[in-house]
Image (cartoon, rainbow, N blue to C red):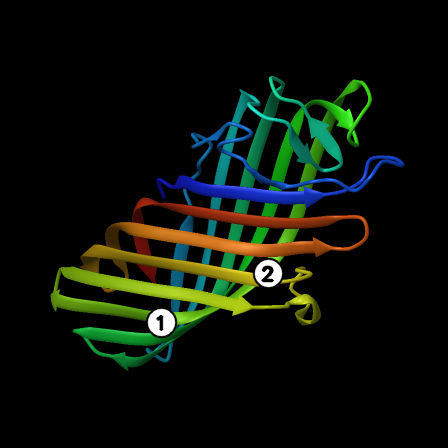
Amino acid sequence: WFAKLDKLRADLRDAVGSGPVIGEKVDFEEDFGIRDGPQMLAGFRALLGYRKSLYLRGGYQELGFRGGTTTERATRFAGYTIPADTFVDTSARFDFFEVGLQYNLIDSDVLRFGLLAEPKFMNLRLRVSGTGQEGTSGPLVPFYEKEEEFVIMPLLGLALELRPLDYLGIRGEIKGLSIPNADSFGLRVDGRLRAVDAEVGVSLVLSDALALTGGYRLLRFDLELEDSDPRSLDVKAEFSGWFVAIDLRF
């Protein structure tokens, strides 16, 4: 997946020592200079058939981005005030694990249409380092802020595949979920959870078990990960880009 980082915003509010709780919404591209890749690795996805219409789906995808910049404005992040004209270094890594079921309501040689239930397990790691003030005043001190969160996003959706020719397939799928307050669902999220994962592609079908596919994919999520005293953390991210894949069906 040749993913482009379209959006990465985080609002991390915390206190350092006895200082006040401070933080604000930070755009990691505009404020902290994070850039696209090239820390991107190949992913995989497999469909394991059972009784023809039922498939077990599994996959993995890793995305990584890093960068650095001299800040143009004073920024409050994780209990620190980062003055303008201060260099910050940052990175973000996302590991996505997927496992779920696809049940085809229509499963013919020409048309497949099915329902998807696919939990997406995400390990998120954000790192920001530089110099800043503890709280809102005082001398500049080095800081190193590293956040790691593990989240479960149980996505539901639809999948469609057309086979107008024996060797040609056209497919698309969309999965998503919106929960205003996910705290009581055991998903490692204290507040809202919204996510969308969609893709379209064209496949060159080599056999019933193997196809080469190219297409476009969009993934976005909006998570209120922590909401406790004194910490709170909100993260919004969006990725999009072309992909190439080898599809395996068993």
Q: Earlier in the sequence, mark 2 or mark 1?
A: 2
Q: Residues within 10 Å of mark 2 (few under 14, many from 20)?
A: some
Q: Which residue is mark 1?
A: 158
Residue at screen point 24% across, 68% down: 161
Comparing 46 with 125, the one in front is 125
Q: Quadrant of the N terminus?
A: top left
Residue drawn at (59%, 26%), measured in percent from left and top? Answer: 73
Identify the amino acid type marked 1.
Answer: Leu
Q: CA distance from mark 2 to mark 1?
A: 19 Å
Numbered label attached to residue 152: 2
Note whether residue 223 is visible.
Answer: yes
- Quarter of the image for residue 210 reads bottom left
Indicate whether 51 appears above or below 67: below
Residue closest to the eye, 222 or 58: 222
In this rendering, the answer to whether 146 lies above or below 61 is above
The amino acid type found where label 2 is placed reads Ile
- Which type of secondary structure does the marked residue at label 1 adopt? strand
- Compared across the picture, whether 11 is left or right of 174 comes to right
| Quadrant of the image containing the C terminus | bottom left
Q: Residue at x 48, y 41 (%)?
A: 63
Using residue 158 as the reference point, say whether residue 234 is left or right of it. right
User: Left or right: 27 with respect to 232?
Assistant: left
In this orientation, does residue 250 appear?
Answer: no
In the displayed structure, 228 sits above or below 94; it is: below
- The reply to whether dot 2 and dot 1 touch (C-beta < 8 Å) is no
